[in-house]
Image (tube, rainbow, N blue to C red):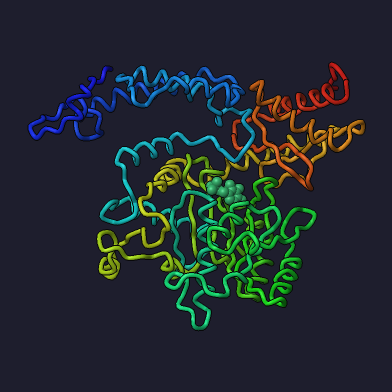
Amino acid sequence: MRIKKLDPISVSKPSHHKRIDHSYVMDLFGCSKFGYYEQVNQKGIHTLKQVTESCRQPTTGIYPDELKKKFEHISLDHPLYDIDDALQELQELYLKDTTYYHHPDYISHLNCPIMNVSLLAEQIATAMNTAVETWDQSAGATFIEEKVIQWLIQQVGYKTKADGVFTTGGTQNNLMGLLLARDRQGLCEMGHQGNTFAGLSANAHKYRIFCSEHSHFSIQKSAALLGLGYQSVCPVACDQNLRMDPIALENEIKKADASGLIPIAVITTLGTTDYGTIDPIDSIADVCERYKCWLHVDGAYGGILLVMPSYRYHLRGIERADSVSVDFHKSFFQPVCCSAFAVKDKNMLSLLTYHADYLNPLSQKLQGTPDLINKSIQTTRRFDALKIWLSLRTVGAQALGHMFEQLIYTTKQVYQYMESIDVLEIVIEPVLSTIVFRFVHPKCNLEQLDHCNQSIRKHLARTGRAVIAGTKFQNKSYLKFTLLNPETKVASICDIVDEIVAYGYQEYCNVKNYQFT
Ligand SMILES: *Cc1c(COP(=O)(O)O)cnc(C)c1O
């Protein structure tokens, strides 16, 4: 399909009489023939089919300097003028070496395979190019988002005063939780006209945020963005199950109080990124009530438990939290981005409202117009809710929960297998779908073991065998499996485990051809 080449001279020459050449307009969706969209779409589907059908490994293991070479001769000033050529180029530059999350041997980060219907939803929402910030830009999309939010609120167990909004992910959710906590505190301070108007109060440098040592790093980043600094984040010790210890929390808060600091927020993690562990929300809510701290539940990973009734006991007290967030793109099999933030008291969201005359004037709000921008820190915002909506309307929440239950089950079985291997040290029995472990051998010292485990990971990636993650626990290098593909078979993960062990032996213990019994 050839796209006519523009004459560069006639482009740069302004001419009032110039007629538009319709061969370019053809590329605008909806403006011209629908057939062209169908044609390019077919090509896109064909490309994806080729990629998925020929994919044998989760990665090609290419290094940055190897791939970078392919980009050197590309000049964006020289179009290819041909969609087939451009797609072929894309194969080389991107698709051929892309990290393939759908492959069962991709067990690295919290990237899930996605529902077909959600991908379709993505395409539909993108085709309409809907931006959901105001009613006049979105109509039904606004209500779809609100309906999903109301559904989420119901799962949390919030009452009618609750509300929420879709966001870009857990990072933005933690930022929003802390923003509301900070600004609620600002409103309580005598002689201060509130942070949104007057900026940070003179006391802001005393604000303190409490979270477990295993919570997400975006809390530190958010604290810095909010003008409170990393120093405002106080790590709270965990129990042996890597759950925040509520007694330690209370002690930390008391200590801060006693030295004139101002505890404003506690963030509990519903499924820590590395271990999947869940802080005891109910006991922490007791502490937060006593010290009037904002309680945010970061459910980026473990939010899926909301639709898994037999795991509900992990969430006891979640409805007492001031805010709760869920990343649908982590554990609900949705494409990035798809994430939501809910608050117990919807009035708090007005801290984020700014009325712009051209967009969301106060008069509009007074008339009851549902402008979602009034609840968001973004302006132009994608219609991400449609993805989870279409999943809920087709397979339903229960099916998503079952898919995750399968993952937990598979993870437990892999764990049992790994437990039987004496050169593997596992940090903790899995709660969700991660296993953090390392190769250990009495012949190796600590430094060798760190090096060994890091090189196991690199070796697996370089050979394309598997993509696994690495992390640190008590300052030592560990490896991590994150299972998010319900189709992953126990046996195929156990094969990877065997290769890890064999590699560890070979490289560091000079044991060749280690045999598994
Ligand atoms: C991944 C993760 C985040 C960050 O979420 P993004 O969607 O990547 O912004 C926050 N908290 C936890 C516990 C996470 O696992």
Using the rendered view, name the quadrant where residue 43 is placed.
top left
* Residue drawn at (63%, 73%) of the image: 262
User: Which sits in the foreground, 357 or 295?
Assistant: 357
- Residue found at the far right of this picture: 443
* Residue drawn at (15%, 33%) of the image: 14
Compared to residue 9, the image places residue 205 above or below, namely: below
**Residue 482 vs residue 398: left or right?**
right
How many numbered badges does the structure rendering display? 0
Work out whether residue 308 can be spotted. Answer: no
Q: Position of residue 500 (x, y in %)?
A: 76, 27
**Residue 177 vs residue 405: left or right?**
left
Compared to residue 189, the image places residue 369 above or below, namely: above
Screen quadrant of the N terminus:
top left
Work out whether residue 217 can be spotted. Answer: yes
Q: Position of residue 409 (x, y in %)?
A: 68, 39
Using the rendered view, name the quadrant where residue 284 is placed.
bottom right
Using the rendered view, name the quadrant where residue 403 is placed.
top right
Q: Position of residue 184 (x, y in %)?
A: 51, 72
- Residue found at the far left of this picture: 17
Compared to residue 292, the image places residue 76 above or below, namely: above
Q: Position of residue 138 (x, y in %)?
A: 29, 51
User: Which sits in the foreground, 459 or 112?
Assistant: 459
Screen quadrant of the C terminus:
top right
**Residue 52 vs residue 441: left or right?**
left
